[in-house]
Structure formats: C-alpha cells, structure tokens
C-alpha cells in the first residue's frame, strides 16, 4: 500500500515527500512486500526522506544508542533522518532538532533533509538553518495546511497533480500522538 502511495504521489512531481513512518522491521506480508516498497522508494528517492528513530537506553554505568533506520530492503538509496522530537519540561514541543550526534557523526534530521529537498526544488523559504535546532514557528490553527486522507490517494480519488511542487508529509495525525 505504501508503494502504491509513493508511485501515485511521485507522479505528481512534489518537491519533497517525507514518510514519517518507521520501516524498521520486515513486513508481516513477507519479503516480496518489502521489495515492492523498496522499488517504489527507489523510483522517488530524489524527492523522498524516510524516518528513523534514535533510541537511547542506559543507566549510570552505560548508554546505548540505536539509530533504527529503515531496513535496507526498503530504504534503498533514499535518504533518512531522525524524526524524533524533544519535548520541553512542560511536555510541549517548541524546537525542531535539525542534527543529532550519533556514533561521533553528525546526522541530519528528518526536518533538515526535507528543507534541503524544498530548497533544491526552488520553494520559497527562510534562510538556511545553521544551528543544531530551531524554534518551531507554529503558524495558524487547525486546518492551516491542507490535509489529504491517505486512503483517498491510494484509491485514486485524489489525482497526483494535487502534490505538484508541494512538500508532502505522510504520517499519523491522531491527537493522542501529538504529531
């Protein structure tokens, strides 16, 4: 189903597609399912960013971090970045982390990679971010940005041209996830 979405959305020539869905484990439907998604990812890889999830566990004696990227069969040659966010002490998200340290390497985050694709496509934008994070400028209330139901794209109700020149973000929108 995700492969179908990427094929339809990709035909619309968006500036960027950000898949804020973790593909960290093989499909329950088998290896053919993963290969089909990987093939679709490769077809739109120059406009696609996949999500990874940085996890940290440990105690006073050790700290272990894992990047949790998409599995190789799915990610192909597409870029991926950490889609994690850091909440402030009051549980609100006010900052976007653009770069994360992982294994002594500076990893660009999901947000920064999407920004770079938008910049490459010539979309109007603010100055290039230079720091490790930025303050989120929450603009407008609910409905300020158009939303399209995923199922309407894969069933053909929404034509690919809707995405022309746009940044397309795919992910959960339930209020319980605060996403």
Image (tube, rainbow, N blue to C red):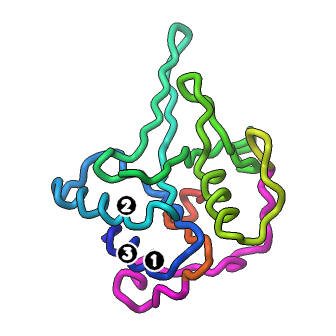
Of 22 and 175, nearer the camera is 22
- In the image, residue 57 sits, relative to residue 148, either above or below, namely above
Q: Are marks 1 and 3 in contact (CB under 8 Å)?
A: yes
Q: Position of residue 13 (x, y in %)?
A: 52, 78
Q: Which residues are magenta?
A: 135-162
- Marks 2 and 3 sit apart, C-alpha to C-alpha, by 10 Å
Q: Earlier in the sequence, mark 1 or mark 2?
A: 1
The x and y percentages for residue 10 are 45, 75
| Residue at image mark 2 | 42
Helix, strand or loop status at disc 3: helix
Residue at 55% over, 59% down: 176
Residue linked to disc 3? 7
Q: Is residue 88 depicted above or below 103 in this figure?
A: below
Residue positioned 42% across, 39% down in the render: 68
Task: Give the camera-side residue of 125 and 77.
Answer: 77
Asked if the stretch drawn in magenta spans residue 30, the answer is no
Label 2 close to label 3 by CB (< 8 Å): no
- What's the distance in space between the residues labelled 1 and 2, CA to CA? 14 Å
Disc number lying in front (2 or 3)? 2
């Amino acid at each position: 189903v995700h492969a179908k979405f990427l094929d339809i959305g990709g035909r619309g020539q968006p500036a960027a597609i950000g898949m804020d869905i973790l593909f960290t484990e093989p499909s329950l439907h088998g290896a053919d399912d993963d290969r089909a998604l990987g093939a679709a990812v490769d077809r739109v890889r120059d406009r696609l960013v996949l999500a990874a999830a940085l996890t940290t566990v440990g105690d006073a004696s050790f700290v272990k971090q894992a990047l949790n990227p998409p599995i190789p069969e799915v990610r192909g040659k597409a870029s991926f970045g950490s889609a994690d966010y850091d909440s402030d002490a009051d549980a609100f998200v006010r900052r976007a982390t653009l770069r994360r340290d992982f294994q002594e390497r500076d990893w660009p985050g999901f947000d920064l990679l999407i920004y770079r694709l938008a910049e490459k496509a010539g979309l109007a934008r603010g100055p290039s971010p230079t720091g490790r994070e930025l303050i989120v400028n929450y603009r407008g209330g609910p409905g300020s940005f158009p939303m399209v139901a995923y199922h309407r794209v894969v069933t053909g109700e929404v034509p690919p041209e809707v995405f022309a020149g746009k940044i397309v973000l795919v992910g959960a929108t339930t209020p319980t996830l605060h996403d």
